Amino acid sequence: MKSSIFLLVTLFVVSNISAQVDHSEFIEGPFNSPQEVTALCLECHGGIDTSIMKTRHWNWLGDEFTTSNGQKIRLGKQNIINNYCIAVPSNWPRCTSCHIGYGWKDENFDFSDGRNIDCLICHDHSGTYKKVPTGAGIPDPSVDLVKVARSVGKTRIENCSICHFNGGGGTGVKHGDLDGSMINPSPTLDVHMGALGFTCSDCHAGENHEILGASHGSLAAGTNHITCLECHGDQPHRKKLINDHVNSVACETCHIPAFAREEPTKVWWDWSTAGKNRDPRPDEYGMPDYDRMKGDYRWDLNIIPEYGWHNGRADYYLYGDVINPDKVVELNKLLGDIDDPDARITPFKLMKGKQPYDSRNNYLLVVKLFGEDGYWNTYDWDDAAELGMQTIDMPFSGRVGFVETEMYWPINHMVAPAKQSLRCTECHSRRGPGRLNWLELGYTGDPMNTGGRNKER
């Protein structure tokens, strides 16, 4: 364990050993557009634009893979349906306010134009840079582009937090393990960032601006994973018995005993109740339980994760997949089981809700929420569905229904100190069920007790 901690501290020191370059002497201005800032950046950092335009951050798509029916596709934020704000198509200017680019306002955005790369959103050190929330990634007119450009440096937690901690419309809405409390976390909330001073890029930065770490597009393809073992090794504990768990249990299962530990996260979103003239009421955490534009909410705090076998891949709902409206629709299905040598028991946030579907064609709908003719202005689901489905070239029958859905979100952050990790008895107990459901996981009982089935590796 001591050697692992030494390695982590060494990596952190080495990654931060180079002095911060003062860019102020290279920046004069004025700038008439943010694209002019990018052009100036590229005068010294030539070729960076070509690299960035190949990345997931830019394209909002993961690697290409082959589906079970032989179709080759790429999935990502750009074309996945979720049970938060539903889908990006037809809602671009609102969703793409978090894109690392300028001007993705419709389906005609030119992904090959490097002038629209936003260098400032990731490298600002002034603390003053911000985008228009509905402006397709364009900076707020109040931003002093010269001041921001002169301040730039290595990415910090604050840079990443602007988008990743606020997905879905606010802090902690989507990611149960990423919220405002992680900007300056205590050592007990996250040992890497709070105790060792890590930033996001200490773990996630890859080569050529390709950010490491698997979210939904990467889970669909089964690529771009980073694991705790890459730094800690496959024998991170003093006790052999605990090290033996590495083959079957993800590190996060024991070392993230709960998520949303300081700020609540949304766990239920019901679009079917939207449009009513009802005032929201604060729940026990002070969070609103209703929004006319979005429907009913439920929030929760200090949540024990859902656990399941996972081999790093997941099957995702695709446009046009036929559903059974009498059953909960799985927007992503985790792959892996007890017999899969690549699978480990892994923690997730399970998001649940109700969202619109075509009740004649029996598939989920892409709906236009934002904009002049969007639902948030008209409160007409039929029109919103018609416009949304047009953007993905699929028919709408004219009949909107609502169906329950669920979606798994990885839990990788809020790693607690070792002393706060799970105790053996929290999963293995003779006094009653622990936090793992052994039967659902494929065992005949607790593998530590008589009759339990051990997973062969």
Image (cartoon, rainbow, N blue to C red):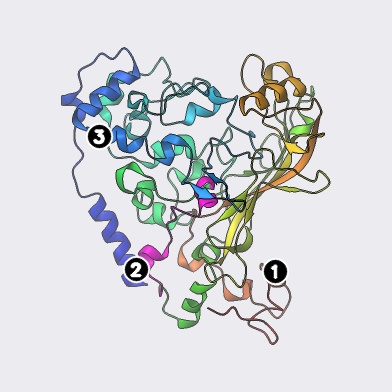
Q: Of circles 3 and 2, which is in front? A: 3
Which amino acid type is shown beneath numbered disc 3?
Gly
Q: Is residue 375 left or right of residue 140?
A: right
Residue 4 - label: 2
| Dot 1: element | loop
| Dot 3: element | loop
Which amino acid type is shown beneath numbered disc 1?
Asn
Which amino acid type is shown beneath numbered disc 2?
Ser
Answer above or below: position of 233 versus 217. Answer: below
219 in magenta: yes
Q: Position of residue 50 (x, y in %)?
A: 30, 34
Q: Is residue 368 visible?
A: no
Q: Is residue 261 left or right of residue 267?
A: left
Q: Is residue 309 left or right of residue 140?
A: right
Please state the total of marks drawn on the protein image: 3
Answer above or below: position of 228 versus 221. Answer: below
Residue wearing tag 3: 47
Q: Position of residue 344 (x, y in %)?
A: 55, 67
Residues at marks 2 and 1 touching, judged by CB atoms closer than 8 Å: no
55 in magenta: no
